[in-house]
Amino acid sequence: MNRYTPLDFSELHTYSLHGRHSKVTVDNFARPLRPGATIGDYLAALPQQFLGVDFPELVARLAAIHKAGRPIVVGMGAHVIKVGLNPILIDLMERGIITGLALNGAGIVHDTEVAMVGRTSEEVEQVLGAGAFGAAKETGEEINAAINQGAAKGLGLGAALGDYLLARNFPNNHVSLLATARRLDIPLTVHVAIGTDIIHIHPSASGAAIGQTSHDDFRLFCAMVADLEGGAYLNLGSAVLLPEVFLKAITVVRNLGHKVERFVTANFDFIRHYRPMTNVVNRPTMSGGKGYNITGHHELMIPLLAAALVDRIANG
């Protein structure tokens, strides 16, 4: 026989709802948009909860940073390029809003292929079985030639590729981050892990040249991070490599005596990862900055950020 009997709730103590503090009120609710609403109207109509608060706040902070003449540096993974967002980022570069970029090794592969032929991203499943994945002749030859030439000239990897693309006058240089950054004299660094990128399997690859140019770029990236006081660092879609690079750069510049304490960071990705949250959003801003984590698809959230930021800068 069951030794428990149901509890009697008849003497439960209650209180008045009218006197209770509540986290959500109708004043916080979203407002429907009318036809013809602006991006500013959209932000103002968001519910005052979670990202409905954080996203407009981030936009306002970034606009203030730009107006104060402080840097906004973007580190990004290759997926941002693959979903077609180069024109959005290039517009922010042209406007002087993005002041520096950092890519991983896959980023230069997709960006260069776009510049050369206007398309990128192969169907891995279709070619992996035959051992043909990453074996595109022109991709390996052109990128490795740029890196090898850059190493001989003492250039960093990003500058070397930017110069190479401009010299070759490829038909789609206007949608290349590498070519645009070099044309606008915006620092763009490339951070490589040997073996992660298809160009490393090509006969023209030089480990010495890749290592030299990428290490030069790490030192340049550290110079950008040393200037981040009062600025912002945005991590767009890099789950591991660039968050690790950013954390190492932070410790280098602080070790060398640079004050980098009060600045804004933000991570944009479609799932939450440990390293961006820890190494970009939380740890670097503990001494007085503010970090944001924005979860959503790149092809939606990054154009939204750009549009909102341009509007805020123009309209205050």
Image (spheres, rainbow, N blue to C red):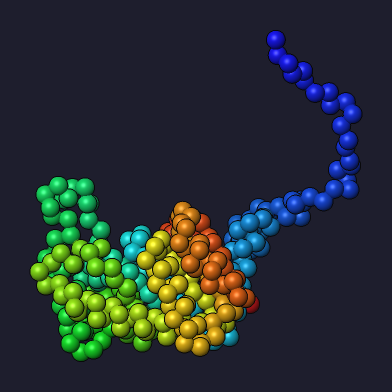
Q: What is the quadrant of the N terminus in the image?
A: top right
Q: How many marks?
A: 0
Q: Quadrant of residue 83?
A: bottom left
Residue closest to the eye, 7 or 223: 7
Above-or-below relation of 46 to 87: above
Q: What is the quadrant of the C terminus in the image?
A: bottom right
Above-or-below relation of 44 to 90: above
| Residue shown at the point (39%, 76%) measured from the top left | 101
Residue closest to the eye, 118 or 80: 80
Residue at the farthest top position: 1
Measured from the top left, where is residue 204 in percent x and y? 11, 72
Q: Is residue 100 visible?
A: no
Measured from the top left, where is residue 189 in percent x and y? 34, 78
Measured from the top left, where is residue 95 in percent x and y? 46, 81
| Residue shown at the point (57%, 79%) measured from the top left | 261
Say whether residue 122 is left or right of residue 100. Answer: left
| Residue shown at the point (59%, 79%) measured from the top left | 262
| Residue shown at the point (30%, 80%) measured from the top left | 215
Q: Quadrant of residue 147?
A: bottom left
Measured from the top left, where is residue 47 in percent x and y? 67, 55
